[in-house]
Image: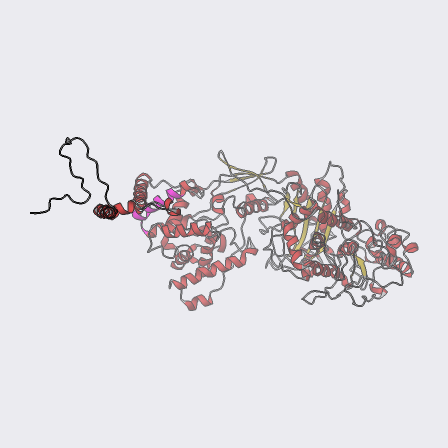
C-alpha cells in the first residue's frame, strides 16, 4: 500500500475544522526554505524570458549622461519629421514663388550725396548698359567668365546646396565672406531681385533659380548674366564694360582682356588697377586664377597661357556731373561704404540711397581755394615742363569726432581720376618722425647708453653717422649733407635730422615703432611698412587720409577716433546702420602731448614757420620724399587737423617724377608750398574762432632744458665705451646767426631763424640759454653766442640769410633754407 503521508511542508487538515476557516501553516524547515527560494527565482527568470529582450531592457535604468540622450526611436522619428517638413517647404516654395518681372536695378536709380548741411554734392547712378546677344560675345570671353565664377555651369544644376553650405561655413569660421551661388542664382539676384543680404531674398533666389533652370536654357541664363552683371566704372553688362575699360566693343575683346573683365566680377571697385593702384597685386592674382582655370578646363592651351600678358585697362572717363572735387568726394565716400561693409559695391550701384556726409561745405570750399591761390594759379605748364607734373592732395579732420570735414583730391576728377588724398604710392618722408618719438615716450625707451629719451636727450646728428645697435647696417644722409654734431631731440625735430631719428628708431625698437604708428591710425597693410631703421625716414607709402588720421590721434591727446565720411544713409523710409566708432586711447596722453610740444617748436622755430600765418597755435612736421617726388606738411591746431601733400607724376605715363624746377623753385620742400596751403586753409577754416593754446601734459623732464656742457667736457657717448663722436669742421656745422638772419628779418625764406637761434646755437656751441633758444636768433646772437663759434655763426647766418633767399639752392656745407628741409 502506498505511503499517504503529506508532502513536506504541507499541514494536515483537521477534519473537525470547517473548510472556510484558515488552517495554520507549518513552518518549513531550513532546507525547505532554500528550496522554495530557488524555485521562486527560477519562476521569475522564466517569466522574464517570456516577456522578451525589450522587457529586459525596459527594466534597465540609464545612469549618468546617458539619461539625457533620446532613444534611437525618438531620433529616427525626429529625422523623418524634419525631412517631411523640409520636403513640404520645398514643394510649397516651388509652387508659391513665381518668376517676377525684372527688378528696378535693371534701370538703376541714382544715389544722392549731400554735404553735412543737406545741400547736394553730386548725384550718380545713370545707367550705362547695352544688351548684346550671346553670339556676339567671343567664346573665350564666355569661358573666362565661367572660369572665374562657375566652371561647372553647363553640367551642374541651377543651385548647388553643397557650395552654399561650404560658403556659409567658410564665412562663419572667418575664412572670408564667400558666395556659394551659381551663375543662375547670381543672374536671378541681378535681374529679378536685388543685392540686399537678407534671408527672405536668399529664399526667393533659391526657388526662382530652380524654376528658371527648369524653364530656360543654359545659354539664355548665361546671356542674361553677362548683360546684367556690374563691372565697376558704372558699367552694367559685358558690352558697357568693354567700352569702359578698353574702349572697344565686346566682340573685339582678347582672351586676356576678357579674363580681366571676368576678374572684376568678384570685386568691381577693388580690382580696378587704375582707380586703386594699391590693389594691383590682388587683381593680378585673380586674373591669373581665371587664366589657370581656363587651362584646367582645357579652354585655353597652356602654351598660349604662358605668353599671355596682363592687358592694361584704359583711363577712367568720369561722368560730367562729377567734375571738380565732386567726383573725388563721391569715390572716397563709396570706398568708405564698401570697405566698412556698410553696403557692397553692387548693392550701392543699385542706387536709391540718400547719403549725408560729414563734409563741411564752407571748409571744403576753403581748402579748394587755398590750393588754387597758393599753388594752382601759379603753375605755368606751357613755360615750365616741371609744372605739368605737379599734383596736390589734402584732408582735414575734426580730431574730437573723427569727421572728415574737407578733402582735396586733384585738379579735376574728369581730368585726373586718381584721388591724391587716398592713393598709396608716395613716401610720407619725415612726417613719420613724430611717430618714432611718440613710441619712445610710450615705451619709456632709452638710448644705447641708458639715457631716457625726452625732447632734451642729446644725440649725435652727423651726416652718414652709422646707426648703432641695429642688425642692419645703416648710415643715413641728412638733408643737404649737413652734420650737426651733438644736438637735442627737440632740435633734431626742428631741423628734421635723419641721423638722429634713425638711431632713435633702433633705440626704441622698430617693431614697437610700427605698433605705435598702427595704433595712431596707419593701416597695417600700408605699402613698404617694413620695420627697420629706414622707416624713421618715412619710407612707407601711407595716404594723405591715413596720415591725417594718425595726426588727429596726436591732436586729441592720444585718443583715436576712427575717421568717417558719413552722417546718415537712408533709402526710402529705411536707415542703413553705420559702424560703431568707439574712441580708444591709442597711446598715453603723456606720449601724445610731449610729441605735440616738439611739433609746436617745429612751427615756431623749425622748418614749419610758414604755418604761423594761420594766426593760431599749431603743431606740425614737414617732409620731403625720396628724390623730391613728394613734399608734405602735416599739422594741427587743438581743433583741426590737416595734411597737405604735393606730388610729382607724369600725366601721360603715370610715372612718379621729381618736383625739381616746379613753380620756378630749385626744389619743393614741405615747409614751402604745402605749409603755405595749410596756413591759408586753416586761417579761413577757423575764421571767427579765438586762437586756443594746446593743453599739454608732458613727460617728466620734457620741459627742462639740459644743463650746458662745459667747453672742456666730452659730449655724451652713444654706447658705453664708444669713442666720442668727432666734431665736424666749422664749415659744415650750422651756427647761430645775428639779427640779419633772425626770424623777423631773415624769415622762413631767407634762412634766418633756422640758421641760428635754438637750432644751432644750442648746448654744444654756445649754451642753450644764451646762444640758443632764447637769444640766438636776435641781435644777441653775436654777443651771447658763447665762444668764437657764436661770432662765426653771426657771419654765416647773415651771409646765408641774404644770399640764399627763397629761390637759391643750399650753399654747400651750410644748412639749407627751411623750405628745402624735410
Q: Position of residue 804 (x, y in %)?
A: 81, 58
Q: 809 above or below 334?
A: below
Q: Position of residue 703 (x, y in %)?
A: 80, 49
Question: Between residues 695 and 529, which one lies in front from this camera angle?
Answer: 695
Is residue 119 something that shows in the picture?
yes
**What secondary structure prevails in the magenta region?**
helix
> Number of labelled discs?
0
In the image, 555: left or right of 49?
right
User: Residue at image x 46%, y 67%?
Assistant: 307
Quarter residue 462 falls in: bottom right
Q: Position of residue 403 (x, y in %)?
A: 63, 42
Is residue 539 something that shows in the picture?
no
- How did the renderer colour the structure? secondary structure
Quadrant of the image for the C terminus?
bottom right
In the image, 57: left or right of 605?
left
Quarter residue 752 falls in: bottom right
Furthest toward the left, the residue is 1
In the image, 141: left or right of 821?
left
Is residue 169 magenta-colored?
Answer: no
In the image, 392: left or right of 665?
left
User: Residue at image x 27%, y 47%?
Assistant: 56
Is residue 211 magenta-colored?
Answer: yes
Read off the magenta span.
Answer: 202-217
Q: 296 above or below 641?
A: below
Q: Position of residue 128 (x, y in %)?
A: 46, 46
Furthest toward the right, the residue is 783
Question: Between residues 520 and 271, which one lies in front from this camera angle?
Answer: 520
Amino acid at each position: 500500500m502506498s505511503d499517504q503521508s503529506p508532502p513536506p511542508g504541507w499541514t494536515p487538515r483537521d477534519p473537525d475544522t470547517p473548510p472556510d476557516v484558515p488552517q495554520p501553516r507549518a513552518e518549513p524547515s531550513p532546507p525547505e526554505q532554500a528550496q522554495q527560494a530557488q524555485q521562486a527565482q527560477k519562476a521569475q527568470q522564466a517569466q522574464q524570458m517570456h516577456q522578451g529582450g525589450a522587457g529586459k531592457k525596459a527594466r534597465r535604468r540609464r545612469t549618468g549622461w546617458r539619461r539625457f540622450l533620446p532613444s534611437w526611436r525618438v531620433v529616427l522619428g525626429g529625422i523623418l519629421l524634419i525631412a517631411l517638413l523640409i520636403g513640404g517647404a520645398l514643394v510649397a516654395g516651388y509652387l508659391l514663388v513665381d518668376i517676377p518681372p525684372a527688378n528696378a536695378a535693371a534701370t538703376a536709380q541714382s544715389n544722392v550725396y549731400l554735404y553735412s548741411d543737406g545741400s547736394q554734392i553730386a548725384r550718380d547712378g545713370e545707367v550705362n548698359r547695352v544688351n548684346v546677344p550671346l553670339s556676339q560675345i567671343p567664346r573665350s570671353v564666355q569661358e573666362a567668365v565661367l572660369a572665374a565664377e562657375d566652371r561647372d555651369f553647363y553640367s551642374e544644376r541651377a543651385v548647388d546646396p553643397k557650395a552654399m553650405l561650404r560658403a556659409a561655413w567658410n564665412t562663419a569660421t572667418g575664412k572670408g565672406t564667400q558666395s556659394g551661388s551659381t551663375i543662375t542664382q547670381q543672374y536671378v539676384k541681378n535681374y529679378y531681385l536685388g543685392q540686399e543680404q537678407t534671408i527672405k531674398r536668399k529664399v526667393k533666389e533659391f526657388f526662382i533659380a530652380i524654376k528658371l533652370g527648369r524653364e530656360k536654357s543654359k545659354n539664355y541664363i548665361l546671356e542674361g548674366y553677362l548683360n546684367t552683371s556690374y563691372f565697376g566704372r558704372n558699367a552694367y553688362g559685358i558690352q558697357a564694360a568693354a567700352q569702359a575699360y578698353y574702349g572697344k566693343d565686346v566682340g573685339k575683346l582678347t582672351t586676356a582682356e576678357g579674363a580681366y573683365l571676368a576678374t572684376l566680377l568678384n570685386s568691381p571697385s577693388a580690382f580696378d588697377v587704375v582707380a586703386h593702384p594699391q590693389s594691383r597685386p590682388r587683381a593680378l592674382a585673380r586674373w591669373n586664377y581665371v587664366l589657370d582655370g581656363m587651362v584646367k578646363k582645357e579652354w585655353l592651351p597652356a602654351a598660349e597661357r604662358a605668353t599671355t600678358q596682363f592687358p592694361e585697362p584704359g583711363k577712367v572717363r568720369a561722368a560730367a556731373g562729377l567734375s571738380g572735387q565732386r567726383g573725388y568726394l563721391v569715390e572716397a565716400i563709396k570706398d568708405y561704404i564698401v570697405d566698412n561693409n556698410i553696403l557692397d559695391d553692387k548693392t550701392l550701384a543699385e542706387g536709391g540711397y540718400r547719403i549725408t556726409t560729414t563734409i563741411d561745405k564752407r571748409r571744403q570750399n576753403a581748402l579748394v581755394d587755398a590750393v588754387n591761390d597758393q599753388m594752382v594759379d601759379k603753375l605755368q605748364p606751357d613755360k615750365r615742363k616741371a609744372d605739368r607734373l605737379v599734383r596736390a592732395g589734402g584732408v582735414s579732420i575734426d580730431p574730437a569726432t573723427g569727421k572728415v570735414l574737407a578733402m582735396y583730391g586733384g585738379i579735376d576728377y574728369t581730368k585726373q581720376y586718381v584721388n591724391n588724398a587716398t592713393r598709396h604710392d608716395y613716401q610720407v618722408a619725415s612726417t613719420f618722425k613724430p611717430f618714432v618719438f611718440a613710441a619712445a615716450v610710450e615705451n619709456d625707451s632709452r638710448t644705447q647708453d641708458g639715457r631716457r629719451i625726452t625732447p632734451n636727450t642729446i644725440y649725435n646728428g652727423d651726416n652718414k653717422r652709422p646707426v648703432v645697435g641695429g642688425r642692419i647696417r645703416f648710415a643715413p644722409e641728412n638733408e643737404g649733407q649737413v652734420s650737426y654734431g651733438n644736438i637735442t631731440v627737440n632740435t633734431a625735430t626742428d631741423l628734421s635730422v635723419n641721423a638722429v631719428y634713425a638711431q632713435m628708431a633702433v633705440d626704441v625698437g622698430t617693431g614697437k615703432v610700427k605698433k605705435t604708428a598702427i595704433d595712431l591710425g596707419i593701416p597695417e597693410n600700408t605699402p613698404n611698412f617694413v620695420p627697420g631703421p629706414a622707416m624713421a625716414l618715412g619710407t612707407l607709402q601711407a595716404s594723405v587720409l591715413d596720415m591725417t588720421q594718425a595726426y588727429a590721434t596726436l591732436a586729441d591727446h592720444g585718443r583715436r577716433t576712427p575717421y568717417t565720411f558719413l552722417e546718415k544713409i537712408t533709402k526710402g523710409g529705411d536707415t542703413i546702420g553705420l559702424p560703431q566708432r568707439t574712441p580708444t586711447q591709442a597711446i598715453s596722453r603723456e606720449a601724445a602731448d610731449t610729441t605735440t610740444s616738439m611739433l609746436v617748436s617745429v612751427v615756431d622755430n623749425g622748418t614749419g614757420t610758414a604755418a604761423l600765418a594761420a594766426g593760431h597755435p599749431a603743431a606740425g612736421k614737414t617732409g620731403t620724399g625720396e628724390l623730391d617726388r613728394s613734399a608734405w606738411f602735416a599739422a594741427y591746431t587743438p581743433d583741426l587737423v590737416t595734411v597737405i601733400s604735393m606730388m610729382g607724376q607724369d600725366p601721360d605715363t603715370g610715372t612718379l617724377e621729381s618736383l625739381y624746377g616746379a613753380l620756378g623753385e630749385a626744389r619743393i620742400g614741405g615747409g614751402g608750398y604745402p605749409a603755405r596751403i595749410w596756413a591759408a586753409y586753416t586761417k579761413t577754416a577757423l575764421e571767427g574762432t579765438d586762437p586756443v593754446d594746446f593743453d599739454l601734459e608732458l613727460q617728466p623732464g620734457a620741459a627742462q632744458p639740459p644743463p650746458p656742457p662745459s667747453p672742456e667736457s666730452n659730449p655724451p657717448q652713444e654706447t658705453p665705451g664708444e669713442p666720442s663722436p668727432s666734431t665736424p669742421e666749422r664749415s659744415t656745422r650750422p651756427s647761430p646767426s645775428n639779427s640779419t638772419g633772425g626770424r623777423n628779418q631773415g624769415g622762413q625764406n631767407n634762412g634766418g631763424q633756422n640758421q641760428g637761434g635754438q637750432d644751432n646755437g644750442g648746448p654744444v656751441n654756445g649754451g642753450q640759454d644764451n646762444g640758443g633758444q632764447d637769444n640766438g636768433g636776435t641781435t644777441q646772437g653775436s654777443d651771447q653766442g658763447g665762444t668764437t663759434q657764436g661770432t662765426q655763426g653771426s657771419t654765416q647766418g647773415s651771409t646765408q640769410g641774404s644770399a640764399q633767399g627763397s629761390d637759391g639752392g643750399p650753399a654747400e656745407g651750410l644748412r639749407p633754407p627751411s623750405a628745402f628741409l624735410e
